[in-house]
Structure formats: structure tokens, C-alpha cells
């Protein structure tokens, strides 16, 4: 708890004087306990003296939630983008500074012990799967944990803690997203999630999270977080979270496993020493930069799973099962035949910037890291035909070029609307305190370097179009995907490890294509991209 | 030619005085040109003044053939195990020393230019395939080159030169093997080969070899060769080449590709840089110890193809296509998960005794050797289901244990009858002057070491039963396979590279099984196997 309080004070200090912050917290406590002079009733009436909510009435816990999140909800109640019989009228009577004060107060309270009276019961395995794995192939459904954090404790302003939350409240919100009576979700994410859940699944997930001990939300360490905290003092300044029109999936897009290879279910990883290595491979894949076996080979905040969704299982997201049967293969990139192992080592070299890692180089072919990743890939491809280099769903399906080309300036608008929510205005993403990356950095020192495939605008556009925003694939237009990819790759990032000191030479040898800004486009600071790489 | 003459003189010197050898050659020339005082007509009448034969009458070339081979044929004509209207009666009039003399004389003559009047024509691709690849999956048919040498120039006493031989003679002999009118083939090999060829194929192969320039036979550098040469002076001393009863294939054995995966045909290796690497992989596989890319990693006279017949394509002969889809896998041998690359490196470490190679170690995972072998394996498995660890035909199908166990003494008899013909009495096999291995060494310094899978008696028995003699699989009884495997592995071979100086420790750690003589059985010289390894 001390960490949380400390964090909030520090963050607030950017906007208000420390003395004023303390005063605001005191004001918040007063509002919570006594109401306001303007006639707002005391919050404790419904949310409890400790802010733990009231399970029997489905009133939510507020204690320990993120201040920015709480403030945004109050503002949304006040402005009408969220409605509730009691809360709407109450919020309309609150002034900005009162919203900030009461939000800060509740954020500073310790998280009470869960009051859940039932667990997910027989539905626990289903709930755990939805919470930690989602259901990608069938319905593009991200795991709850992918945004709310691994333990559901919440992340930053837009992803509230749901662990130890009141079950009835969680359920009511999911049903509200589903029916459309609540619609203040950023980028339409919760609507999309709730739409694909059955009521039984919603019950299961609500009970599952309610029974977990609530924890401290992870700070969103990126620029978006800074702005979010800013919202406490200066609401409505930035609009990441606007209501979007929910679109039907474009006709013709294969849904579920239709036409795609189906890797074995996660729970079928075999027992025994081989299965142990497969499971370790999956764990490394999902948390490459934080896993004790592999972290020493990762020089940034990237994990394999950041570019290969659903732990490398998802079609159109460079699934491992399609790659496995396509290697060895000749690659133009290094003009030789590459084994699968060399291909994976390339991911470390470029996407995970191994030169900046503790080891300073990718893991060896017989290292635990590589052997585990190979075993995991092989297992995912179980039954796939060897040599099929054109499995449906392989890679990121290329986009047709647009007559409008691609434009970082147009892309900046898309980015602010649809991407900065998770990846931050500064592109730094969110990495948790234990080293795990929740939202990967898209540029800067902790992102992929200039040798990674993703630095190509066409590759990034294809990835984005088919995979972003998380859980809402194919909702950006192709033009938006092109533009935002150009915006992302118009920023500086770690040097291409093939660079031998001369930018022009490296550009000519490795960056000749027109989908590539390296050595060709100037940064906002006026130097050529690649000239003064991030972190160098 | 000088080499050949030199070799014969040297070999003869083991049995007769050099002066006598020269005298014998002179006598041979006299017989050939004038006949014998006992009334044998001059050989030149039919075989030509230069020993080149007479193509129009299908009389064979004798010049440059192996002396031991020629002598054996004359003895067979004399003894009735080979018959011919003219030759039988002539040979009956020849004394042992006359047979030796005339054989030595013809062996010493230069090989005349081919007198072939036609090539294989349209049938040339078929003929080339039969000559250099055989037709293993469909009919267990070895390539002619596998015994007669890569250019058909002949090897030692039992595999005569067929390049530049008279086409009509080759055809007549194959038809004679087929019909049973000629039956003096060692181990029934030629009967087996001829039975599976159509007359059109026989025509094609005969024309193909007749059109090749004849060359000098390769010396059989093993002990069998020594004994063969001995036959010139001391006939009938050893009987490797006795007539065997030809058996029908056992009922129930899958013939052809029935039930087995079919790798892509060799001629379908793709064009381009990837295909080039696949083709290099095949070449390395077939001649690992002689190929310029891989030879530096091989410390003995073994090639991959020695244990994986038909260049790794053949079912029940540890085919690569079955191995490819079964790796990575956990192996008890080293108690960890091994990638396919590590598995192949293990073959270099043990079966190809890399410690004694120029490099002193197996090739690295990203070496040209490994990448090529991986590409070749992958290509062979094209279409095979990833993860199928039980593909029919994988490995060497295990034999049931026999109530009689296995016995090297019984195995020695089998070996002399069925194996020494190619592998030599001393197990040293035949390696050609260009470094290529024709018949692999089975023990001694140039064979697999004590860490290779083949040192296990059960593994060797399975291999032998299903693959040996070459082209006559499953003709040994299972008991014979067990016994001869025990005999083979009761000889000394290079040290196990896991040995750290103490035989008992190595035995306990790595050689505990009862199918393994290492550290447990004494050699004929009285030391424990593994104690003074071959070549150490």
C-alpha cells in the first residue's frame, strides 16, 4: 500500500503542489464519509466504510482502485456517457476538484479482503481459461489478464482492478456492456469482449475474479499514464477513451478456426520431461524478457508473444505452427538457408535486441531457451504437414497498397485514438514491476530494433490491421493500418545490429525498400532515423 | 594402370615369391595367346588380342578385370558352379597355377576403349537411376554402384567391373541369373537383383554400362580382399561365395511403399538456392566422410548413408522422414530434450567419431553441414504429419528376443558366410581411394565408436535383420541376426567419447544394459572391450 500511496503522490506532484494533494485527500475522505455541503450523500452508505463495496447489493469496491479510473467514471456519470440511477445524479453535483479529491482518497485506501461468498465452482476451469488465456481462435477474445494485469489488479487509468471486486458488480457491468446500457469503454474493447461471452461465462468470470485477493494496480509507466493522472486535475483534456461505433466483422473474414489449422489445446501439453520443456517454451514465449531462463538474452521489453498473439497460436498473427513446417527455408534477409533455430535466433537478434541483453547475443542452438521454444513450436504444429509453406493464416496477411500511400501525420491521429491507450503517447508501453511486459513498447530503447521485420511499414501495417486493437482485429481500416504503422515506424529505436558505423552504407545494404524509413526520414528532432538510435 | 599392376604384385607377394609372380604373368600371356600344351585354345580367339572381348558375339572383356574374380570364374567353370558351352570344358583342362597365371595376365592388361555401339538411349534416365540409386522402396533393389563401385569399375574379387563391358554379355548374365542358369553369385545377390529387373531394364542397364569407359577396379582393402587374392594361389580355401538357396520374401512383409510414407522423388529436389542446399545435404548424407563440406567432422570411414539405406529414404532403415517429424524429443541417452540438430550432431559424435576428425567435434548448428542435412531431412519429410513419433517404418523394427539369446561364436559363422564378402574378415569394409566408403567398416578404428547406437546388440540385430545383406533384407533368420550382431559388437572399436578415464565408471554410467559388451566381455586378445579401443 505504501507503494501505491507513494506513487499517487509522486504522480500528482506533476500537476498540483504536494501540500494541495494532501489537502485534496483530506477533502476526499470528508466527501466519502459525510457527503458534500452541496447535498451529495456519503459514499460509505453504499460502498462501505472501508470502500469494499456491498456484495449483497452488487455495489462495487472502490478502495485501492486507480484514482484516474475512479475520476473518469465520476466524470462519465456526470457527463452522461455512463449512467446509473444513483450515481448519475450524485456525480452531477460534484465539482472537478471534488471528483479528484474523492478519487484520490479511495485510491489510497487499502484493498479490503474479498467478501466473495462463492467461487466459480465447477466453472472454475472455464473461468480461469477466459481470465488467463481468452479464446482467441474462436472469437478473438483476449484474456482478461491481458489488459487488467496478470492477477486482475488493474493497470493504469483504463483497466481497473477486477480481482477482489464484488461479483455481482462485475457481472452487472459485463451484462451492461453486452446490452449497450454501459458504453464508456475505450476503443470499444469491453463491448467487444462482453458481446462474445455467454451469461454463464460472465457468471463464471465474475465469481472467479471476486474470489481472488485484490491487489494494487500496476502503474502505467508510459506517457498515457501521465496524461491519465493529469485528467484528475484537468479532465477532458485528452480523449483516448471515446465511445466508438461497434462494427460487424467484415464479411469474408474467417471466424474461429474455419479454414485454419488448430493447434492442440494448451491443457494437452503432455506429462513428463518432454511436456515440461514444452510448457517452459510456452512460458518463455509469453514472457521472454522476464522469464529467468530467457531474460538474459533479451535487450528490451519485448516478448515473443507481443508479435505472435495467443502465445503463438493465432492465425494471421504469425502462428508458430505455420512457421514450424515452413523451415528450414532460404531467406533473402540473410541470403542463406535458415533452420528454424536460426530463424528464432533472428527474433532475439532483432525483435528482442539481444545485443543490449546481459548475454549480448541470442541464445545458442542447444540452450534451454532455444530448445524449449523449438519444443513448444513443434508441439503446436502437431499434425501439420511438413513442408507446407503456405498454411492458411501464416504470417500477417499482406495488405494491398493504398492509393493514398501511408502518412505518419495521419497515423498520429489514429494512434492517439486507438493505440496510445495501451502503448502510451510516447510508445513506451507498460512493463510490470516484475519485468513482464503487458503492452509492448513500440519505439524507443525498449522496443524492437531497426533490423526487426516489424520496422517495415508494410509488415507492421499487416500486423496491425489483423491484430490490433487487441481483441478487435480488422476494425481499423486498411488505410488507418498503413498510416499508424508509418507513424509507429517514424520514431527512433535501437540500432540495426548489422550497422557497421556508417548510416548510408547500412541504409543501402539493408534498408533499400520504400516501406522503410531507416536512414531516409528525419525525426522530429531533425536527425535521420538510425543516426542517433534510441538508447545508443 | 601402374597402380593396378603394383597392387597385384604387392598382394601376390603375400603368397608367392615376386620372381614367381612375374613368371606366372608370363605364363598367363602364353596361355592367352597360344593356349596350353594340354590343348586349351588361345583365349584371344574369343576375347580379342587386347582382352576387350567381342561385342558382336557378346563375349566379355577380360582385360583389367580383377585377377581374383577371373580366377574364381575359371574355378567355377571347372567345378560346375558356373556353366558355359565353351568355357566349362576349357576350364576343366586348366591347372590351378594356369588359372592363376592367366587371370593375373588379363588383370594386368589395360582396359580397352569401350566398343559399345549404342547407348541406353531413351532409357538412359531409367538406367542411370537403377545404376546409381537402385529402387529401394519398391523392391529392395540396391544400385549397381553400391557394389560394383560408383563408376562400375568393380571392387575386389566379388564385384567385377561392368563399365565398358560388352553390353550383350552383361545382358546375358543378368538373364542367366534371372532364369537360374547362372547361380555362382555370392549371397544370392545377383539372383535377387536380376529377379526384380524387367528385360527392358536389363537392356537399359547393359547399354548404360557398356557405354561407360572402363576403369581400374578398386582394391578391396579389407581382409576379405587379402583372402581373395589368396584364392589365386590357394583356391577353395575360403568360401564366401557359395550358392545360397533363394527364398521367397517372408509373408506379411510390406513390399514397396505399402503402408509407408513416400518421400518426394530425388529428381524433384527444387531449383534455386534452397534446392541447392537440399541437394548438398543429400550428397553429404551419402558420402559424409568424403564430402568436402563434411569430411572434416568425420573421424572414421562412416557416412550417414551406411546406417540409413537409400540415402535415408528407406523404411525400416531409420528413414529421415520419420525422424524429422519425431524431433525434438526427450532422449534417455542424454536425459534431455534434443532438437533434430542435436540428434544429428550425436550421429557425428558417436557413429562418425567426430573426436578423431580434423575438427575434433561435430559440426555447429549453423554450419553448412548441419544446415544442409536439416534441409535434406525436412525435404524428405514433405507432407509427413508433424509430431507423428510412430510413423510406420521408423527406426529399425525391434526383434523379439530369442530363447537362444545371442552368441558371437555362432555369429562368426554367419558373418563369414554372409557379411565378410563386403565388410571383410577383419570388419574393415572397403573405402575407395577418393575417400568414399563403399562397404562400411564394422569394427576397428574406422568404425562407429562405443557411444553409437549401433554398438547395442539389439539395435544392430534389428538393423541387420531388416537391411542386410544389402538388397536381401529379411533373409537372415532373426536368430542369425542376433548372433551376427553379437559377433560384430564383440570386437574393439573407438572409445566412447563420454569415457573419462575409468572403464568401470563409464560402463556403469552408460553401458549397463545386457545388449552391450562394453566393459564386460573380453576380446580375443584378453582385454575388456573398451579397455584398449581400436585406434587409441
Image (cartoon, coloured by chain):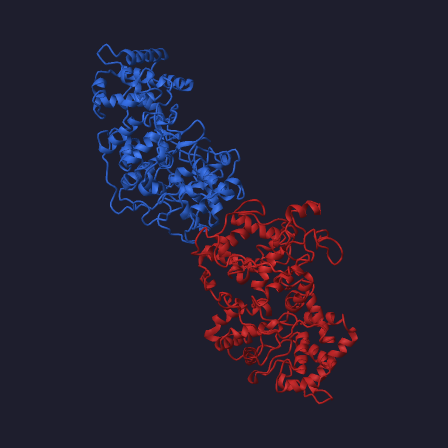
Chain colours: A red, B blue
Q: Is residue B72 visible?
A: no
Taking the spot 43% from the left edge, 43% from the top edge, the residue there is: B268
Which of these two is toward me, B520 or A21?
Answer: A21
Q: Is residue A470 visible?
A: yes
Q: Reply above or below: A412 against B253.
A: below
Q: Position of residue B232 (x, y in %)?
A: 30, 19
Q: Position of residue A101 (x, y in %)?
A: 72, 79
Q: Is residue B239 left or right of residue B300?
A: left
Q: Position of residue A134 (x, y in %)?
A: 52, 68
Taking the spot 24% from the left edge, 40% from the top edge, the residue there is: B248
Q: Reply above or below: B96 against A78.
A: above
Which of these two is toward me, A475 or A112?
Answer: A475
Which of these two is toward me, B201 or A258?
Answer: B201
Q: Which residue is most to the front?
A: A403
Q: Position of residue B506 (x, y in %)?
A: 45, 41
Quadrant of image for the N terminus of chain B? top left
Q: Reply above or below: B319 against A41.
A: above
Q: Is residue A167 left or right of residue B327?
A: right
Which of these two is toward me, B114 or B144?
Answer: B114
Q: Is residue A243 left or right of residue A393?
A: right
Which image quarter: residue A85? bottom right
Which image quarter: residue A48? bottom right
Q: Reply above or below: B61 against B287.
A: above
Number of marks present in the image shown: 0
Amino acid at each position: 500500500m505504501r507503494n501505491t500511496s507513494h506513487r499517487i503522490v509522486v504522480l500528482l506532484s506533476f500537476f498540483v503542489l504536494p501540500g494541495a494533494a494532501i489537502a485534496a485527500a483530506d477533502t476526499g475522505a470528508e466527501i466519502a464519509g459525510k457527503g458534500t455541503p452541496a447535498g451529495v450523500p456519503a459514499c460509505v452508505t453504499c460502498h462501505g466504510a472501508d470502500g469494499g463495496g456491498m456484495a449483497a447489493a452488487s455495489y462495487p469496491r472502490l478502495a485501492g482502485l486507480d484514482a484516474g479510473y475512479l475520476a473518469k467514471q465520476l466524470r462519465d456519470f456526470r457527463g452522461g456517457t455512463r449512467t446509473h440511477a444513483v450515481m448519475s445524479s450524485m456525480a452531477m453535483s460534484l465539482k472537478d476538484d471534488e471528483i479528484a479529491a474523492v478519487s484520490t482518497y479511495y485510491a489510497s485506501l487499502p484493498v479490503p479482503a474479498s467478501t466473495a461468498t462463492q467461487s466459480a465452482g465447477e466453472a472454475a476451469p472455464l473461468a480461469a481459461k477466459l481470465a488467463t488465456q481468452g479464446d482467441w481462435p474462436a472469437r478473438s477474445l483476449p484474456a482478461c489478464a491481458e489488459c487488467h494485469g496478470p492477477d486482475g489488479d488493474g493497470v493504469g487509468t483504463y483497466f481497473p482492478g477486477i480481482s477482489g471486486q464484488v461479483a455481482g458488480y462485475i457481472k452487472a457491468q459485463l451484462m451492461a456492456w453486452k446490452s449497450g446500457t454501459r458504453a464508456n469503454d475505450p476503443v470499444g474493447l469491453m463491448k467487444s469482449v462482453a458481446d462474445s461471452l455467454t451469461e454463464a461465462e460472465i457468471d463464471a468470470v465474475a465469481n472467479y475474479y471476486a474470489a481472488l485477493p485484490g491487489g494494487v494496480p500496476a502503474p502505467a509507466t508510459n506517457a498515457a499514464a501521465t496524461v491519465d493522472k493529469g485528467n484528475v486535475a484537468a479532465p477532458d483534456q485528452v480523449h483516448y477513451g471515446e465511445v466508438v461505433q461497434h462494427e460487424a466483422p467484415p464479411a469474408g473474414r474467417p471466424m474461429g478456426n474455419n479454414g485454419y489449422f488448430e493447434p492442440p489445446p494448451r491443457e494437452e501439453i503432455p506429462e513428463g520431461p518432454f511436456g515440461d520443456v514444452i510448457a517452459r517454451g510456452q512460458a518463455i514465449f509469453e514472457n521472454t524478457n522476464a522469464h529467468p531462463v530467457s531474460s538474459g538474452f533479451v535487450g528490451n521489453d519485448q516478448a515473443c508473444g507481443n508479435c505472435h498473439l495467443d502465445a503463438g497460436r493465432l492465425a494471421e498473427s504469425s502462428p508458430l505452427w505455420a512457421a514450424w513446417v515452413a523451415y528450414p527455408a532460404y531467406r533473402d534477409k540473410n541470403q542463406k538457408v535458415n533452420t528454424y533455430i536460426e530463424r528464432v535466433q533472428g527474433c532475439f537478434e532483432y525483435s528482442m535486441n539481444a545485443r543490449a541483453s546481459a548475454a549480448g547475443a541470442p541464445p545458442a542452438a542447444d540452450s534451454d531457451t532455444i530448445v524449449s521454444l523449438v519444443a513448444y513450436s513443434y508441439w503446436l504444429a502437431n499434425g501439420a504437414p511438413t513442408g507446407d509453406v503456405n498454411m492458411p493464416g501464416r504470417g500477417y496477411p499482406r495488405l494491398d497498397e493504398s492509393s493514398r500511400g501511408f502518412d505518419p501525420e495521419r497515423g498520429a491521429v489514429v494512434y492517439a485514438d486507438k493505440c496510445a491507450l495501451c502503448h502510451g503517447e510516447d510508445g513506451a508501453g507498460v512493463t510490470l514491476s516484475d519485468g513482464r511486459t503487458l503492452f509492448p513498447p513500440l519505439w524507443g530503447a525498449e522496443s524492437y530494433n531497426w533490423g526487426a521485420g516489424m520496422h517495415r511499414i508494410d509488415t507492421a501495417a499487416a500486423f496491425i490491421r489483423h491484430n490490433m486493437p487487441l481483441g478487435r482485429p480488422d476494425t481499423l481500416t486498411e488505410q488507418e493500418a498503413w498510416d499508424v504503422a508509418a507513424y509507429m515506424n517514424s520514431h527512433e529505436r535501437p540500432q540495426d545490429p548489422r550497422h557497421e558505423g556508417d548510416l548510408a552504407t547500412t541504409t543501402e545494404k539493408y534498408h533499400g525498400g520504400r516501406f522503410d524509413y531507416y536512414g531516409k526520414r528525419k525525426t522530429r528532432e531533425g536527425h535521420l532515423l538510425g543516426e542517433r538510435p534510441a538508447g545508443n
